[in-house]
Image (spheres, helix red, strand yellow):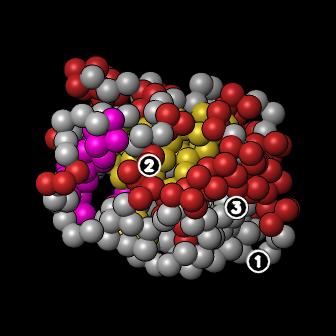
Amino acid sequence: MYIGAHVSTAGGVERAPENARAIGANAFALFLKNQRRWFDKPYPPERVRRFKENLKRLGFSPEYILPHAGYLINLCSPDGEKAKKSFLALKDEVERAHLLGLKYINFHPGAHLNRYSEGEALKIIAERVNEIIDQTEGVVLVLETTAGQGSNLGYRFEHLAEIIERVEDKSRIGVCIDTCHIFAAGYDISTEGGYIKTFEQFEEIVGFEYLKGVHLNDSKTPLGSRKDRHAPLGEGYIGLTPFRLMVNDDRFRSVPLILETPEPERWREEIELLRGFQKANKGEVFEDKGFKPPFGV
Ligand code: ZN
Ligand code: MN
Ligand code: MN
């Protein structure tokens, strides 16, 4: 299993691999530029060279790195100027990922701000994605599931399926499941039965061939609350059940599993907890009886 977290790039993108290594990760996420600004300076060539060198030296493979696009992007913004900026900003993120030798860029589908119907907005998003794919190369655009806060789309698997359906080059579109977001959107993964049912639906509606990553978060707010509030694993309304199941589920074996939990100083322990679950189910080393989770469950 490829497990990591969304690590800091303070000091430059080339620092991310070391930050991931420091928490015992073999996968990671990062921002490719300041996530709260529309645009940023291009990378100096030296920075790109050091990023690639650090990946290689520390043994990270691009398949398990899932960069996250900036927060301002809204491909279906009803505001003409913001729509234009969103298009250019996401295109720039794709180009940055490509320059760094990465394969994916994760982004939130968009919010219609009550100016479009959901159907119209999904169509606009797909059109913009097609244009970006046409004007760039090599990188898969990864749609993240959302909690459905406000008018955000992506809170039903059908939304993602609808966008994928309209994208011409299917080799360049993918999805990322965020456990907090889907739970807040109403998919009850907190029990084994609910986990089985949710991922059966995902397979039927979207298909695991499109899965490029998972964000691992517990939720501070209840099932169906449509709020996006991450909690440390086991400390929210979801609990540990789906995480225990996921790290032993072959459908998640070849994608990066990325913590976005709120306390970075605990990521190392959270990764160890997940690794422990893996061994537990395989009957190796670890014995359930004496096990004490590193934090309250
Ligand atoms: Zn996100
Ligand atoms: Mn997320
Ligand atoms: Mn979130």
Earlier in the chain: of badge 3 and badge 2, it is 3
Mark carried by residue 114: 1
Give the secondary structure at mark 2.
Answer: helix
Residue 142 inside the magenta-drawn segment? no
Range shown magenta: 260-282
Mark carried by residue 245: 2
- Three-letter residue code for mark 2: Leu
Residue 278 inside the magenta-drawn segment? yes
* Residue at 39% in and 47% down: 258
Give the secondary structure at mark 1.
Answer: loop
Earlier in the chain: of badge 2 and badge 1, it is 1
Q: Nearer the viewer, residue 163 or 292?
A: 292
**Residue 181 x/y as whole percent:** 53, 64
- Three-letter residue code for mark 1: Asn
**Magenta segment main secondary structure:** helix
- Three-letter residue code for mark 3: Arg
Can residue 62 be seen from the camera position used here? yes
**Residue 264 x/y as whole percent:** 23, 58
* Residue at 56% in and 79% down: 225
**Residue 185 x/y as whole percent:** 61, 69
Q: Is residue 264 left or right of residue 214?
A: left
Measured Cα–Cα span from mark 3 to mark 1 = 17 Å
Q: Nearer the viewer, residue 229 or 138?
A: 229
* Residue at 22% in and 20% down: 57
Q: Is residue 58 left or right of residue 241?
A: left
